[in-house]
Image (cartoon, helix red, strand yellow):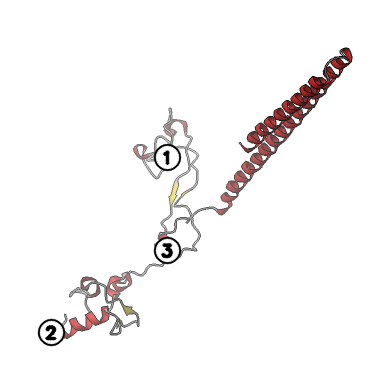
Amino acid sequence: MAARRSREDFKKAKELEELRKLAVAPPEIDEEGNMINPHIPQYMSVAPWYISDGKVGLKHQRQSHFGVDKEKSSIRTKFEPKFKRGKKASKWRKGACENCGAMTHKKKDCVERPRRRGARFTNKCVADEVVKHHETGSFDAKRDRWKGYDTSKYKDIINFHQKVELARRKKKAKELDEQMRRKAAKKKDRLLRRQKKRAQKKAKREANPDADSDSDSDSDSDSDSDDEEGESGDELKDDEEGES
């Protein structure tokens, strides 16, 4: 048990504690050479009177102080499942589960599918569960989110996204081909309409040679301008479809 301190000693200790919190004085060192954080509260840093050995440190907070020194698994320790299946029985045994035939639990605790006729009557038993107790993990091992994850499974995710990307590219290429085909067909139709109009006008001129040539030229220019406007309108529609 710690000796009783005087008022002056208590005041000096309090001042030293404030200086350590302000990083003016060097931090306290325990017997193992580790620095003690001055911001740790007193109820954690000071050992209780019934286990206090008079030394400064946080050793009383560790299990090794009480003789409990367990081997901890690190974050790189290979994960093994907690439950494993043992040997499979050939027939139902007394004291086993009446539903599945395992010796490790009773019928009311069974998580197997409820059978119409249990293993007690059919002698079709499942293997017993062998429980493996894991070693206590370290700080990082207990908080590892990916512990036990099989990295080979990620290849399936990569293959899935590659197939989706390939299908998307094929669909885009097909849409572009269809768009180019429509543009070519529209252009061909415009050329055929223009040739047909010119042929009709030529036939009309040959049939009426005495008609006013000025009116014919005006009508030709109007029809050409109409054709050009129609072509520009079709091109604008095709561009809008391509952008969409």
Q: Position of residue 155 (x, y in %)?
A: 60, 50
Compare residues 224 and 16 and report the one nearer the observer: 224
Numbered tag placed on residue 140 in the rendering: 3
- At horizontal 47% and vertical 38% (from top left) the residue drawn is 125
**The C terminus lies in quadrant:** top right
Q: Tell whether 191 sits left or right of 233.
A: right
- At horizontal 86% and vertical 13% (from top left) the residue drawn is 208
Q: Position of residue 129 (x, y in %)?
A: 44, 47
Residues at badges 1 and 2 in contact (C-beta under 8 Å)?
A: no
Which sits earlier in the primary sequence, circle 1 or circle 3? 1
User: Label 3: few (<14), some or many (≥20) within 10 Å?
Assistant: few
User: Label 2: few (<14), some or many (≥20) within 10 Å?
Assistant: few
Residues at badges 1 and 3 in contact (C-beta under 8 Å)?
A: no
User: As displayed, is residue 25 above or below residue 97?
Assistant: below
Identity, as a three-letter code, of the amino acid under mark 3: Asp
| Residue linked to disc 1 | 93
Q: Tell whether 55 sits left or right of 9.
A: right
